[in-house]
Amino acid sequence: MILIFCAPSGSGKSTFVKHLLTCYNNFELSVSATSRPPRGTEQHGVEYYFLSAAEFRQLIADDKLIEYQEVYKDYFYGTLRSEIDRIQQNGHHVVFDVDVKGGLNLKKIFGGNALSVFIQPPSIEELRHRLEGRGTDSEDMIRQRLAKASVELQDAPFFDHIIVNDDLNTALAQLDELLKQYHLI
Ligand code: ADP
Ligand code: 5GP
């Protein structure tokens, strides 16, 4: 089974993924390739494979990516075919943390084998508050992320499920309920 998490940046995708990976041992995160530089404590091969723009272009040329997007100006992100193979060989469910366009593309590819979940922030103001609180992005980057968020929120109805991440414990309980419903836990 494929689990696709999408949400405007700062809504809590990484927090949801961390919950899944620490509480259950049958899920694995598909580690994406990106041309953006590492942020905070991020490590190559853990959160992302951090590549130069030239290395990223080579992956595209070699057809190593099942999908990719220029999510922010000059920052490319893409899903490696090899990650999906690796995780499925381990007998685990594949977890994707991708942008909204990427998520909808993956849902199209995997169809009924994929469950797409949109994590919705309570408001744009709260999103700004969380991005500022995370303390990993410049003011300009936060502005770009908020501008993109307003557009991404319009695509929420195209997902299989929407979880509003207001109170974190309530939202994680809803996620667990959903996973039970699909016999994933
Ligand atoms: P994303 O991966 O979607 O960009 P993160 O998981 O990094 O978002 O969350 C952004 C920030 O908001 C982090 O500092 C995280 O700890 C915080 N956060 C996540 N969920 C909640 C919540 N329900 N209430 C308050 N803060 C939250
Ligand atoms: P961040 O810079 O906050 O880590 O990620 C920015 C956005 O890029 C997030 O919405 C994240 O989900 C998305 N993203 C991460 N990896 C991929 C990927 O492989 N493909 C696509 N389309 N988006 C991705």
Image (cartoon, grey):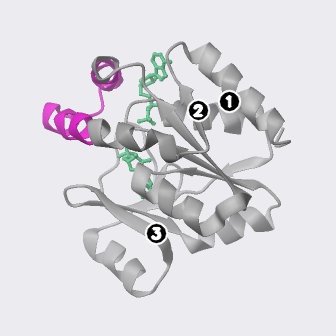
Q: Give percent across and percent down for residue 114.
A: 67, 56
Question: Would you say the magenta stretch is mainly helix, strand or loop?
Answer: helix
Q: Give the labeled residue for mark 2.
A: 16
Mark pair 2, 3: CA separation: 22 Å
Say what secondary structure mark 3 lies in. strand
Q: Earlier in the sequence, mark 2 or mark 3?
A: 2
Does residue 69 sit above or below 146 in this rendering?
Answer: below
Q: Which residues are magenta?
A: 127-148
Q: Which of disc 2 and disc 1 is earlier in sequence? A: 2
State yes or no: residue 36 in magenta. Answer: no
Cα–Cα span, label 1 and label 3: 25 Å
Q: Which residue is mark 3?
A: 67
Quadrant housing residue 142: top left
| Secondary structure beneath label 1 | helix
Left or right: 76, with 98 as reference point: left
Ligand 1 quadrant? top left
- Drawn side of residue 92 relative to residue 119, left or right: right
The residue under label 1 is 175
- Identified at 21% across, 38% down, the residue is 147
Q: Quadrant of the C terminus?
A: top right
Q: Amino acid at mark 2?
A: Phe
Q: Is mark 2 within 8 Å of ligand 1?
A: yes
Q: Is residue 130 magenta-colored?
A: yes
Sequence-first disc among 1 and 3: 3
Mark 2, other Cα within 10 Å: few <14 / some 14–19 / many ≥20: some
Rendered image quadrant of residue 9: top left
